[in-house]
Image (cartoon, rainbow, N blue to C red):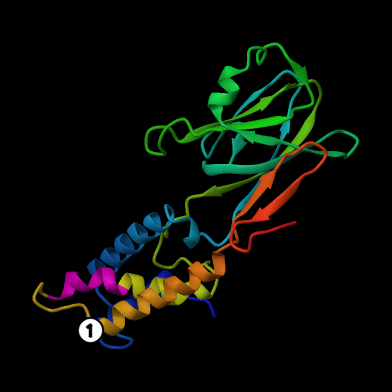
């Protein structure tokens, strides 16, 4: 099943009695629904368990260049600015892959030889460079500075894209459809009903149930890693067992 944004808003508005079933809302009402939907999606972006997947990006690292800007407007890496980078690796010209340690910029800043050391990069640092509104790009920094051409791959989380147009196709996974519909309905309710009219309990329950289903799907067991000499492993903090 695929829905357009307009179809999603029509369903949400009919749930709260703003329109009859299959009745097309006015242009003003649809634009209101679009704004409310995008505000909700922006909020979801700050909730890790609402994000189903991450993105894997790559770029070519050039000899002698340690810093690469990332953004949608004239950056070295043409991509939406990440929220966080959490893993990565480099591939040399012989197609051999080497892991990258993802370290905080404060660690990078403390390195005394960062401007003079060259070699195969062993660390990747992501500097978001401020908020999206003020700085629409971030910086990917490599240490060591590449001594030859490498391909860098990294996994990151990014903001969920807003809906741009009422005719856009909703490209979330199907399990998100109910969460979108009921979330939008709850947020639109007060625009069409007086403060004295309570939001129906069944509507609130459906919103909570759909969010809970997504949380459960996206939840991952927390593992901690150990680096004891000659032995590495992971420890499950819930089961008290190592791997």
Tell me residue 44's x, y (percent).
41, 58
| Element marked by disc 1 | loop
Tell me residue 22's x, y (percent).
33, 86
Decide which of 211, 223 is in the foreground and name it. 223
- Farthest residue toward the bottom? 21
Q: Is residue 243 above or below residue 211?
A: above
Q: Point out the image quarter for the N terminus.
A: bottom right
What's the residue at 35%, 71% (across, down)? 183
Residue 143 is one of the magenta-drawn residues: no
Magenta part of the chain: 185-193
Residue that carries the numbered disc 1 in the rendered image: 17
Decide which of 135, 145 is in the foreground and name it. 145
Tell me residue 101's x, y (percent).
69, 35
Decide which of 40, 210 is in the foreground and name it. 210
- Farthest residue toward the front? 240
Tell me residue 145's x, y (percent).
72, 21
Q: Is residue 54 above or below residue 115?
A: below
In the figure, is residue 190 to the left or right of 36?
A: left
What's the residue at 30%, 74% (across, down)? 185
Instruction: Using a 10 Å C-alpha cutoff, classify the residue at mark 1 as few (fewer than 14 neighbours), some (14 to 19) or many (20 or more).
Output: few
In the rendered image, which quarter is residue 54 located in? bottom right
């Amino acid at each position: 099943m695929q829905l357009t944004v307009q179809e999603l808003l029509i369903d949400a508005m009919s749930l709260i009695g703003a329109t009859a079933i299959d009745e097309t809302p006015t242009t003003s009402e649809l634009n209101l629904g679009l704004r409310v939907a995008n505000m909700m999606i922006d909020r979801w972006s700050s909730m890790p368990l609402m994000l189903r997947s991450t993105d894997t990006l790559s770029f070519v690292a050039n000899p002698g260049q340690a810093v690469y800007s990332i953004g949608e407007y004239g950056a070295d890496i043409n991509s939406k600015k990440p929220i966080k980078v959490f893993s990565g690796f480099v591939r040399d010209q012989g197609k051999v892959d080497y892991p990258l340690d993802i370290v905080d910029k404060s660690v990078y800043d403390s390195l005394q030889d960062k401007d003079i050391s060259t070699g195969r990069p062993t660390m990747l640092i992501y500097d978001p460079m401020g908020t999206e509104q003020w700085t629409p790009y971030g910086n990917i920094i490599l240490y060591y500075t590449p001594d030859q051409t490498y391909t860098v791959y990294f996994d990151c989380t990014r903001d969920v894209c807003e809906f741009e147009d009422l005719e856009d196709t909703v490209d979330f996974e199907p399990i998100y459809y109910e969460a979108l519909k009921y979330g939008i309905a709850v947020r639109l309710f007060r625009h069409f009903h007086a403060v004295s009219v309570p939001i129906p309990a069944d509507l609130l329950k459906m919103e909570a149930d759909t969010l809970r289903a997504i949380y459960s799907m996206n939840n991952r067991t927390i593992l901690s890693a150990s680096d004891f000499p000659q032995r590495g492993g992971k420890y499950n903090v819930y089961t008290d067992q190592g791997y």
